[in-house]
Image (spheres, helix red, strand yellow):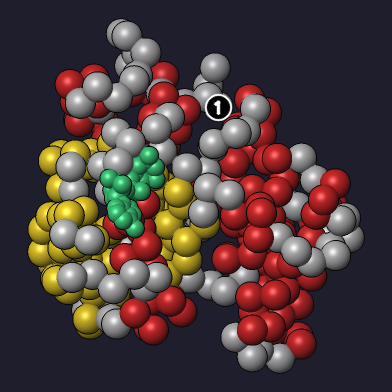
Amino acid sequence: MDALRTEDLRLDIGGSRILDGISLSLEKGSFTALCGKNGAGKSQLLRCLKGLRKPTGGKIFLGDAEAGEKERMKRVALVFQNAEMQIVSQSVWKDVAFGPENLGLGRDEVAKRVEGALSLMGLEHKAGQRPQTLSGGELRKTAIAGVLAMKPEVLLLDEPFANLDYPSTKAVIKALVSLHREGYTLLVVSHDAEKFLAHTDTLMIMDHGVVSECGESRVLYGKLREHDIYIPAGASFEELSWLRA
Ligand SMILES: Nc1ncnc2c1ncn2[C@@H]1O[C@H](COP(=O)(O)OP(=O)(O)OP(=O)(O)O)[C@@H](O)[C@H]1O
Ligand SMILES: [Mg+2]
């Protein structure tokens, strides 16, 4: 069963074709890595999937039914590379509560969701802390907790390891692995395949607005080099994880 599927998705901006007939599917509970060079169209694809940008053509389905922008805004979560810039509340707890409060949920349900999301991200002990005093990894995890509290059906992350040091990167990878274990459907855009690919089941490679490779990560990872995407020479699939270093 697919959590999300696209059919012949196209996006033109100012006369340029940015996405050129993308048909992809994210199986429910799968963990997909999306790699590709700068300008390949990864971030624009995520914006279309989330519902922030209306594609020029094609269809997007959630489950069995086609889902419009409004529907996807509610059911699909997107964590931006600089999501921490959007954290404005006075405490981690309040920040994570912001989303479910905006959904109009009751107090008890909001509290339940915040506690659940903080616990999944391993942030329970940070609930009362001011976000400005968090480390980079903790901030990124707070941003992820904030979208989890809205119980999205699909979680899209754009460059979740950017600007993070080694311990923070490991903390975010661990968090993603536990979300996968919980059954979340994850799509992670990243240039750093070597850091997390071993934990994914599916790999997609984008080039010039098309998905040029898609399949099992374990089978396809060697193709990354052919697309000029770095992975360490001679590394086995299992070695493509900073958790194992
Ligand atoms: N408003 C816009 N006007 C014109 N071109 C745009 C606009 N927004 C994006 N593009 C173009 O769309 C293409 C895809 O951009 P996108 O941000 O999706 O790339 P990306 O794969 O995420 O790259 P990166 O790895 O650098 O983040 C780029 O060539 C970009 O210049
Ligand atoms: Mg991008």
Judging depth in this view, the residue of 112 and 226 nearest the camera is: 226
Residue at image coords 24%, 61%? 13
Please identify the quadrant where the C terminus is shown: top right
Is residue 1 visible in the rendered structure shown here? no
Density class for disc 1 (Cα within 10 Å; few <14, some 14-19, many ≥20) is: some
Judging depth in this view, the residue of 45 and 225 nearest the camera is: 45
Residue 74 horizontal side relative to residue 210, left or right: right
Q: Residue furthest top?
A: 234
Residue 220 horizontal side relative to residue 69, left or right: left
Q: Name the residue type under label 1.
A: Leu
Q: Is residue 168 above or below residue 96?
A: above
Q: Is residue 39 above or below residue 50?
A: above
Residue at image coords 63%, 75%? 99
Q: Position of residue 120 (x, y in %)?
A: 65, 56
* Quarter-of-image position of residue 193: top left
Residue receiving disc 1: 243
Is residue 217 visible in the rendered structure shown here? yes
Q: Is residue 104 above or below residue 187?
A: below
* Quarter-of-image position of residue 117: bottom right
Q: Residue furthest front?
A: 14
Q: Position of residue 161 (x, y in %)?
A: 54, 37
